[in-house]
Amino acid sequence: MVATPDIPRASSAALLSSKPDKRPPNMGQIIRWLLLFIGGVLMIMPIAYMISTSLKWPHEVYNVNLIPEEPTIENYTYVLEDGRFYMWFVNSIIIATITTISNLLFDSLVGYTLCKFRFPGRTIIFIAILSTLMIPTEMLVIPWYLMSQSFGWLDSYWGIMFPGMMTAFGTFLMKQFFESVPDDFIEAARIDGLNELQIWWTVAMPLVKPALAALAIFVFLGNWTAFLWPLIVTNSVDMYTIPVGLSGFGDEADVAWELIMTGAAISTIPTLIVFLIFQRFIIRGVVMAGLKG
Amino acid sequence: MANLALHNLTKSYGNTEVLHGISLAVDDGEFVVFVGPSGCGKSTTLRMIAGLEETTSGIIEIGGREVNNLEPKERDIAMVFQNYAIYPHMSVKKNIAFGLRSSKMPKPDKEKRILDVAGILDMVDLLERKPSQLSGGQRQRVAIGRAMVRDPAVFLFDEPLSNLDAQLRTQMRLEIKKLHQRVGNTIIFVTHDQVEAMTMADRIVIMKDGHIQQVGTPEEVFHRPANTFVAGFIGAPSMNLLPGQLDAGGITLAGGRIVPHPLQAPASDVLLGVRPDDLHPDEANPILSGKVTVREPLGSETLIYVETPSGEVIAKADGRTPPQVGETVNLGAAMENLHVFDAQTQQALT
């Protein structure tokens, strides 16, 4: 008589165990879900109020009701018909896009160099770059302003963009990611006759696409929502970015919150689209950077 | 194809010298394997030949041309890495074609060359696949293909089989050997596996602590080891080394047993070497006796570990009727299979 092998029995057990768990949730799970729910509500409330306020008439703005009594899209019509908003939108797009491209190129170049080349002073340079992260923006705006003034960059795209063309955070992020690119790849390309710039572009960059995507989103969002520096460096309404422009809605007597919230709601759309497309890269990028760090 | 010569090559990191004057001549089309334990300097030597490490002193010549000051791409070499180094974001075809990126060859010729290489490596059907869709052996073939497509003067292999499982290693070993017979390029192959070295090499270079211990054919290094390190490193299980005193009557081992040996040398302390393959139970002319402590059946043969006055030795017994554990056995070996080493210098005297 042939003995029944153990394997089919083990497989059956595995199949049984793969059925959905129908046990009622325990107290720990309930508390976790409750905390997550509260966190979710806290996160969503400002957005909900932004949309709610954008659908309210001016007299209803200070009413805390989430659902407007008389919903209106008048604010959207007003903001979209106002030519200034388009101008600010285009300014923000130009600034955020160029700054993002610049960061992707320069942060990755510096990160790659610091990661893959051995040269005297490498560690000191890296520490110096990192140490700039500890200086608050509020302290930097005065030297930035003086620089802009002496170079004639006030009230220009270049003036708004130059402090963010390359960031210490981006350099750090890219350096950490390039650590995961095996040196063998680079040496193999060197033997195959590529120069260092070609190796960076052809071999190393495609291997850190998740990091590039994450960095692109961080930089784009950062520049899209930047307020303090664009406010300081711009004088003319034509050069405003969306956050600066929106803050000026209203008059000296009153702030038109319904228009500000409408503009904010509209300006959220591009970032929302970008985030929805690339969120998996952001999460992966943040997780990987954390692991590497 | 080209010959390769290393003249008194040294390498230092700071004040620490890790390669101490390596000299070697490799003939055109020869398959030379560098073998040795970790840290012996074999990979460093290979990387210096490739131009990935600077030489501290000495000269490297490829095809009669000094290449010390040339970039890796100018040395007419191709290298296969331990981790394959095939680019995960490129298809097999692009990976193979990568080796031709800097070539000025017309595009149709490049295409033909890629297909030729893919044909030789039996990879034509895999050209559009990504590396993640390939097995370990296939990935290694892609790496070899990328090296082959350039038709370099010298192929450098840096432990290319280390990441493969035992079965695949054996298969790839055979494939690389066949490939060499087919294309005939000069190959420098680095490994820490003495079986790979023995099975593939025309000549083996055995290294230890930054020194070449012996250069020779597999037969030479196995049957005529230059010193006790080579004797112990090549062959599995390792050669038994028994301390003794050499005099006119032969070699006196611990316990007083005298092993007759014709070696003419001044009386001195020596090590008598005998491979387990050559040491068998022998009642007629024993050189050692002792109790069997462990048996390792290998099928047709059985390895027996025998505790003797000279220490534990390993011998080979018949697989059908091996001695029992605890049994006392006499072990003998043919005179021509005995090796004698100077106990002080560890160098071979025979």
Image (spheres, coloured by chain):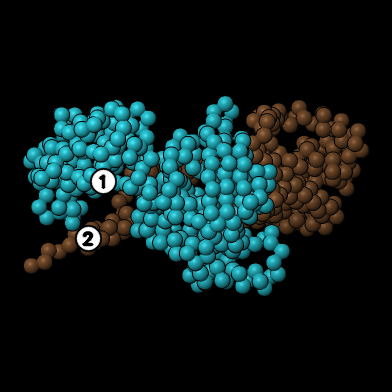
**Chain A painted colour:** brown
**Residue marked by disc 1:** B337
The three-letter code of the residue at mark 1 reads Asn
Q: Is residue B172 left or right of residue A279?
A: left
Q: Nearer the viewer, residue A96 or A236?
A: A96
* Residue A118 image offset from top left, x and y in percent: 64, 36
Q: Nearer the viewer, residue A206 or A288?
A: A206
Q: Is residue B328 above or below residue B202?
A: above
The chain carrying label 2 is A
**Secondary structure type for disc 2:** helix
* Residue B24 image offset from top left, x and y in percent: 53, 45
**Chain B painted colour:** cyan
Q: Is residue B228 above or below residue B196?
A: above
Which residue occupies 43% across, 48% down?
B216
Disc 2 residue crowd, few under 14, some 14–19, many 20+, Cα 10 Å? few
**Residue marked by disc 2:** A7
Q: Is residue B225 left or right of residue B136?
A: left
